[in-house]
Amino acid sequence: MGRAGLLDLEKHFAFYGAYHSNPINILIHTFFVWPILFTTLVILYFTPALFNSPSGFDEPFVLNIGFVFTVIYSLFYVFLDKKAGSLAALLCFLCWVGASVVASHLGFSLAWRVVLAAQLFCWTGQFIGHGVFEKRAPALLDNLVQAFLMAPFFVLLEVLQTVFGYEPYPGFRARVESKIEAEIKEWQDKKQKKIS
């Protein structure tokens, strides 16, 4: 069942889900969140190595901030849910490998332009999703760390639930949906009080 604190998947999923209840907004995020992670890893490729790589393990794979970022995300996802978290961790490492290869081929002078264009496109799409379809500000305005950390895992879980009916444990979906409804109602009540 659910865990407490930092590893409380229900709490994290309900928080993020309360900002992403519109199906079109969820679809937009499904297509744009992982490219944001990927292009972030492309630009982080150019950060300095944290320590010397073992012999034979060199370019394009640099053990730098991008690698640390990947490890943190991966471990967090595995601790949240072993099955879906392991898939998310694999996707994170595939993104790191792919981003490293792309960045090493592009070089910094071209990579930052590609990253900037991709980030602007993806973030614009998400803000349109929130403004036009969700009609609610993004989660990152209320909890920046939680929003950035949960976004890739949230969209992966959404896809796994929608396509395969996956639940981390029986009753997860129903419990989370009731928490999401409660959070949305609380937000709507606060919004109504501000208007009146």
Image: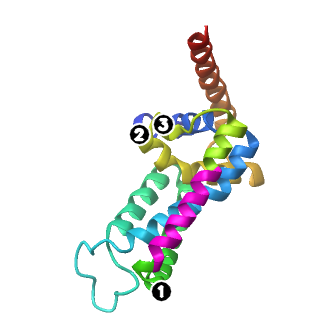
Q: Residues within 10 Å of mark 3 (few under 14, many from 20)?
A: few
Q: Residues within 10 Å of mark 1 (few under 14, many from 20)?
A: few
Residue 71 or 34: which is nearer the viewer? Answer: 34
Look at the picture and state if 89 lies above or below 125: below
Q: Earlier in the sequence, mark 1 or mark 3?
A: 1
Q: Earlier in the sequence, mark 1 or mark 2?
A: 2
Q: Are marks 2 and 3 in contact (CB under 8 Å)?
A: no
As measured in the structure, the alpha-carbon distance from the residue carrying label 1 to the one carrying label 2 is 38 Å
**Secondary structure found at label 2:** helix
Q: Nearer the viewer, mark 1 or mark 2?
A: 1
Asked whether residue 116 is drawn in magenta, I would say yes
Q: Quadrant of the N terminus?
A: top right
Residue ID for mark 1: 105
Residue type at mark 1: give it.
Answer: His
Q: Which residues are magenta?
A: 110-125
**Secondary structure found at label 1:** helix
Residue ID for mark 2: 6
Residue ID for mark 3: 141
**Secondary structure found at label 3:** helix
Q: Nearer the viewer, mark 2 or mark 3?
A: 3
* Residue at the image position 48 percent from the left and 55 percent from the top: 78
- Residue 21 visible at all: no
Look at the picture and state if 165 lies above or below 40: above
* Residue at the image position 68 percent from the left and 36 percent from the top: 134
